[in-house]
Each structure stands twice: as C-alpha cells, then as structure tokens.
Amino acid sequence: MGTLSTRTTRRRGVGVIAAIGLAAMVAGLVAAPMASAATPASWKTYCRNQGGVVQVRTPAAGTNSPPVLRLGGAVAFCRFTSAQDGSRIFIDLRTLTSTQPTLAAIAYLAKPPIGKIPGNVNPASVYCSRLGGSDQFGGANVGGGGWILGRNPNTAVEACVFPDQSIIDSFGLVYHSQNVVRGADLTTRLRYRPTTIPAVFG
C-alpha cells in the first residue's frame, strides 16, 4: 500500500512537472511571435517619418443613429492629410509598415477597375465588397458604423477590412482607383513596394 502510494505520488509529481513544462513551452511559443514582430513603437515612428499622424481608433456600430455600440479590437491607424485640399486617407500601421504583401496594399497599388455602380449606393463600400473586403457594421437594423476616436461618432472613418486583417480607408481606396489621391500617395509610403504587383484582383 505504501509502495503504491509512493508510485502514485511520483507519477503525480512527474505529471505536474510535465504540465508546468508544457505550459511554459506554450507560453514561450505564444510570446515568441510578439517578441519578434515589429513593435508598435516602431510602427508609430515609421508613420510619423512618412508625414502621418498615429490615431488609435475603435470600431463602432450605430454611428449614424446613436446610441453608439463601441466594439472590441481597437486598431492603430496612420492618418495622412493633404496640405492642398485637406483630404485624408487612413491605413492601419501593420499594413503601412509591412514589407510583405497585404490585400489592402495590393488593392491600393493595383487600382482594380471599379466597374458599374448604381447611383443610389455608397461606391466606396461597394468597391470594398467587390474586392473581397468589408466595411459594414452589422445588419440592416444597425445605423451605420465606422472607426471612431474615443466615443465620438462624428469622427467615424469608413475603412475596408480584408480577410488578412489589413485595413485601408474605403474612400481613399476607391478614389485612388480613379487616379485621385486623397491625403497622400501611399505608393511612396508603403514599405511594401513590389517590382511587379501580384495579380490578386484579376
């Protein structure tokens, strides 16, 4: 009985040690990508060096008809403003600073044709959807949505979110497809500058 108890205790001890080791290994694996990735500070510095302003924005539904529902998942954007006409364009810092291709960057650089869009719809939203992104916040009962500063619904920005989580200003994207630059020309500010633009959008 005593021997059985000792063996059980030893097994439990080994099990606990193994569990602690596994937990530490998992924690290390989870922490590793964060440690090796570019830090938010470096993203902010890059944005500012390119002439932009860093803004942390929160996704929110109901911006057209409060009460506003602030959602989870705040994102740091870089805002570029034109000194000539005051127009703006927003892009998330990860997309701006990535040297690897992202769908938002490719869409901006490739300028896929907009095609025919009915006059009674939001062209930027339709264009975003046609490219495989979304800037919608909820269903038909949700009164608008966008990325806001603090709790102010009047600061809402319509941004196209792609499946790879890259994000860019929907209106800036659709205007650029028509060779109109809003805010700043991101082709000279994106870190991703391919020799040949991938034919992702046909």
Image (cartoon, helix red, strand yellow):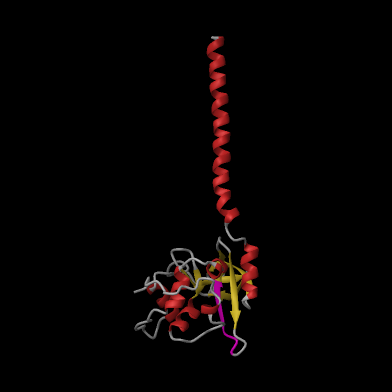
Queried whether the magenta region covers residue 90, the answer comes back as yes
Rendered position, 56 above or below 112: above
Rendered position, 18 above or below 170: above
Q: Residue at x 58, y 30 (%)?
A: 17
Query: How many numbered marks appear?
Result: 0
User: Looking at this rendering, what residue extends furthest in the bottom direction?
Assistant: 84
Residue 183, horizontal then vertical, whole percent: 56, 82
Queried whether the magenta region covers residue 155, the answer comes back as no
Q: Is residue 104 left or right of residue 148?
A: left
Residue 11, horizontal then vertical, whole percent: 53, 22
> Quarter of the image containing the N terminus?
top right
Q: Residue at x 56, y 61 (%)?
A: 73
Rendered position, 128 above or below 69: below
Residue 40, horizontal then vertical, whole percent: 62, 63
> Quarter of the image containing the C terminus?
bottom left
Q: Is residue 189 visible?
A: yes
Rendered position, 10 above or below 76: above
Q: Is residue 144 visible?
A: no
**Residue 46, quarter of picture:** bottom right
Q: Nearer the viewer, residue 198 or 30?
A: 198
**Residue 48, quarter of picture:** bottom right
Q: Which residues are magenta?
A: 85-91
Q: Residue at x 57, y 58 (%)?
A: 37
Q: Residue at x 46, y 76 (%)?
A: 108
Residue 31, horizontal then vertical, whole percent: 58, 49
User: Looking at this rendering, what residue extends furthest in the top direction?
Assistant: 1
Q: Is residue 187 left or right of residue 57?
A: left
